[in-house]
Amino acid sequence: MLAVEENPCGTVRSLPLRGLLNSCPAGVASCPASSCPFWSPLSPRPTLPEPVPLGPRAPAGRMEFSELIRTGRAQAELLSGPEEPPLRGTLCVTGHHLLLSPGPPSTADLWLLLLRSVDSIEKRVAGDSGTITLRCKDLRVLQLDIEGVEATLDIARSIEALSSLESVITSFPFFYRPKGLRLGDAWHFHPPECYYKRVAREVLLRSSQPLTGPQKRRCAEDEDLLRAVLAGAHPGARGFIVDTRSAQAAKQARMTGGGTEAKAAYPGWKRLHRPLERGRALQESFVRLVEACGDPEQSMDRWLSRLEGCRWLAHVKEALSTACLAAQGMEREGACILVHGAEGRDSTLLVTSLAQLILDPLSRTITGFQELVEREWIQAGHPFQLRCAHSAFSHARPKHEAPTFLLFLDCVWQLGRQFPLSLEFGEGLLLALFEHAYASPFGTFLCNSEKERCLCEVRTRTHSLWSGLNQLKEQRKLRNPLYVLNPLAIWPSVEPQSLRLWQGLFLRWTRPPESSEVAWEKVWQIVIEREKTEGSQPTAST
């Protein structure tokens, strides 16, 4: 069985495992210290960000929407990209969507945009009409030419208000009721015990930083826990603590109550610092990359200079290198690995989840990868509501925003490109996760913690993303038709010539060489025809 402990130092660690739930054992992420059985005055708990506003219950939310819609409809023309023809019709604003219904001559389908996916909005008027430019969180740029100046301004204000509502339970997932899905489906199909029992021979732990502080406090329970990890491994086992902060940053953390493990207090464990960017620096790198990708007029030299200057691929390299370090320690040296940064909810999860993909073949299946995302990101407390509040276009720059999960998806894409037969899923699943993490009709990525999801009743009042993605009609878009189970570890190259820009994401709306869906369909047709040919051939008699 999995043993999970939270010690008075404020860290959460478990053994033996490839991951753990970084939350209060009682399921309360911000319980008052006076009533927490794991708290003592000598070991303060970490300061957590402000909880997401829960807002009124859904019926009251419907009343609010009508107050925010200044103009319900107008005649407009939509320009959705250089390759797409303009679409003209009646534009409608609802509480959660922007709709465009084409006029009678057109046979096009209804165009629909989830307002939550709008990252920034620009408006300008000229004469008796106006233009609204919507920059979306999935990196699309849409232009709406609207008849009437007043209608343009009113629709722009409506979109601004409805796309930035803070209340969680008035968001679209609480209203979304698709056909063929039932509430509660696929919310509980990821029992972590099954995974931990399967990988119990290997020890990979994650936690937040120890709260040693300037007084260099010690925690006997934490020291006993890590001592037990080594004792439970093979004789002579060593342990490595992979700290995703620089040595200087870890030292400075002591002044605010954090710190690192003292060498004398943790015999058998060696600390390695592998700094990974987080927070604002990572967000700015993402923004500069998207800006470079959105400029089609620049020269090749200018493009390459901006690509290198944004340092996004450098972040990809550092993340994969650190994950390989952790994986090699377990696979080739039989060592126990503990990964932590500051809070254990960002770069820590990036490293542990990538290490599992490198080592564990079942994590490279569709079901296994869904379990990994659920276990290592959602249940582990990655604050999606804060980190993914905006994408690359917003003029606001809150300090809590960071595309850490997108960096993880990019690293997985690099693994799939270097090992095209070893991942059961393809680019389609990674793109879907990127889009749904920032704006989704499903409730999987809502809130910042299990406590908030419990308070909002997310699991009983919204649909799980996995139930939508696991429908048969969706599987063909997500599955890799060339997949062959590879029981071995996959070791990616991190040399500059081996890492590529993820064009399927960063360039798909600006310079698509060919629709990825069309290319994917062609591969599927080849595989199906080959299977039919092989099945029709007579077998040799024995």
Image (cartoon, grey):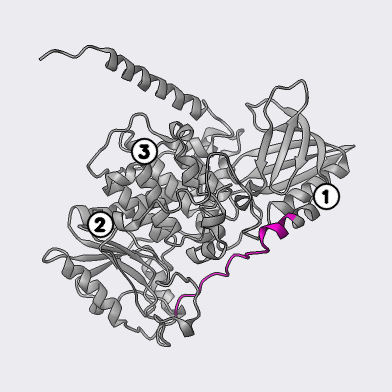
At 36% from the left edge and 70% from the top edge, which residue is drawn? Answer: 12
Of labels 3 and 1, the one closer to you: 1
Please tell me whether mark 2 sits on a helix, a strand or a loop: helix
Of labels 1 and 2, the one closer to you: 2
Q: Residue furthest bottom?
A: 41
Please tell me whether mark 1 sits on a helix, a strand or a loop: loop
Which quadrant of the figure has residue 531? top left
* Residue corresponding to mark 1: 70
State the CA–CA distance, disc 1 to disc 2: 56 Å
Please tell me whether mark 3 sits on a helix, a strand or a loop: helix
* Residue corresponding to mark 3: 416
Vertical arrangement, residue 35 with respect to residue 162, above or below = below
Q: Residue furthest right?
A: 128
State the CA–CA distance, disc 3 to disc 1: 47 Å
Query: Alpha-carbon neighbours of circle 2 within 10 Å: few (<14), some, or many (≥20)?
Result: few
* Residue corresponding to mark 2: 197
Q: Quadrant of the N terminus?
A: bottom left
Q: Is residue 353 left or right of residue 491?
A: right
Give the percent coordinates (x, y) of residue 336.
23, 63
Q: Is residue 46 magenta?
A: yes
Q: Main secondary structure of the magenta part?
A: loop
Give the percent coordinates (x, y) of residue 72.
81, 44
